[in-house]
C-alpha cells in the first residue's frame, strides 16, 4: 500500500482514480438509465445522494488535476522560484481540504434534489379496442426556491469548479 503513496504524483493519481471510479461506478449507470428512460426508478434517497456525489466527485477530479498541474509546474520551475512542490504530507492535507471543499460546494444540490410523481396517460391496445389509462411515473427534479437561486448556484459552481482551475 505504501507504494501508492511513495510520491506526491502517486498520491494525486490515486485520488484522481478514486474520484473517477466513483463517477464510473456510482453516477454513470444511474445517469445513463435516467437519460434513456427519463424516468426515476431509484427513490428519493438515491436521488439526493447520486446527484450530490456526482457534483462532488467531478469537482474533486477537476481540483485534483489542478493540484497536479501546479505540483508539476513547481517541480519544473523550482530552481527559478522560491516556491517548492508540496511534500507527501502537504499533498495529503491538500487533498483532504479539497474533498471537504467539494462536499461543501454541492450541499445545495443535495437539498434541492427530489422526485416528482406525475400521472401520465398510457394508451393500451387490444385486439378489439383501445383504452387510455393513467399511470404514476416518477421523475428527478430540482426544486430551487426561485430561478435566480438556481442561476446563482450555477454561476458559483461554474466559477469555482471550472473557470478558476482553467485559469
Image (tube, grey):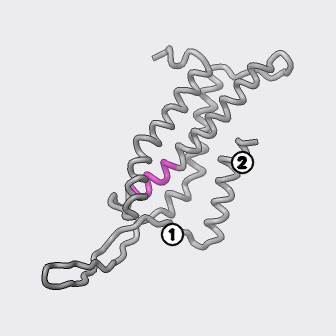
Say which residue appears at 72% left-offset and 42% top-offset.
Answer: 166
Q: Is residue 8 left or right of residue 114?
A: right
Q: Position of residue 73 (x, y in %)?
A: 75, 25
Q: Nearer the viewer, residue 32 or 44?
A: 32
Is the N terminus in the top left, top right, bottom left or bottom right quadrant? Answer: top left
Q: Position of residue 59 (x, y in %)?
A: 59, 44
> Magenta part of the protein: which range?
46-54
Asked whether the residues under the numbered discs 2 and 1 touch, taking CB atoms below 8 Å apart as contact, a structural biologist would say no
Q: Is residue 127 left or right of residue 111?
A: left
Q: Which mark is residue 143?
A: 1
Q: Position of residue 119 (x, y in %)?
A: 33, 78
| Mark found first going from the N terminus, 2 or 1 | 1
Vertical arrangement, residue 150 with respect to residue 23, above or below: below
Q: Which residue is outermost to the left?
A: 128
Say which residue appears at 68% left-offset and 49% top-offset.
Answer: 160
Q: Which mark is residue 110?
A: none
Say which residue appears at 50% left-offset and 37% top-offset.
Answer: 20
Measure the alpha-carbon separation of dots 2 and 1: 26 Å
Q: Which mark is residue 163?
A: 2
Amino acid at each position: 500500500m505504501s507504494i501508492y503513496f511513495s510520491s506526491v504524483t502517486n498520491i494525486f493519481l490515486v485520488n484522481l482514480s478514486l474520484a473517477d471510479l466513483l463517477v464510473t461506478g456510482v453516477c454513470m449507470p444511474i445517469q445513463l438509465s435516467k437519460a434513456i428512460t427519463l424516468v426515476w426508478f431509484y427513490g428519493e434517497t438515491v436521488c439526493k445522494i447520486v446527484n450530490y456525489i456526482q457534483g462532488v466527485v467531478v469537482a474533486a477530479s477537476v481540483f485534483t488535476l489542478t493540484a497536479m498541474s501546479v505540483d508539476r509546474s513547481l517541480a519544473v520551475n523550482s530552481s527559478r522560484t522560491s516556491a517548492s512542490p508540496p511534500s507527501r504530507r502537504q499533498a495529503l492535507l491538500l487533498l483532504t481540504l479539497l474533498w471537504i471543499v467539494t462536499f461543501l460546494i454541492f450541499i445545495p444540490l443535495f437539498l434541492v434534489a427530489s422526485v416528482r410523481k406525475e400521472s401520465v396517460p398510457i394508451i393500451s391496445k387490444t385486439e378489439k379496442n383501445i383504452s387510455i389509462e393513467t399511470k404514476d411515473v416518477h421523475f428527478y427534479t430540482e426544486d430551487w426556491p426561485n430561478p435566480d437561486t438556481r442561476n446563482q448556484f450555477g454561476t458559483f459552481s461554474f466559477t469555482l469548479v471550472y473557470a478558476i482551475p482553467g485559469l
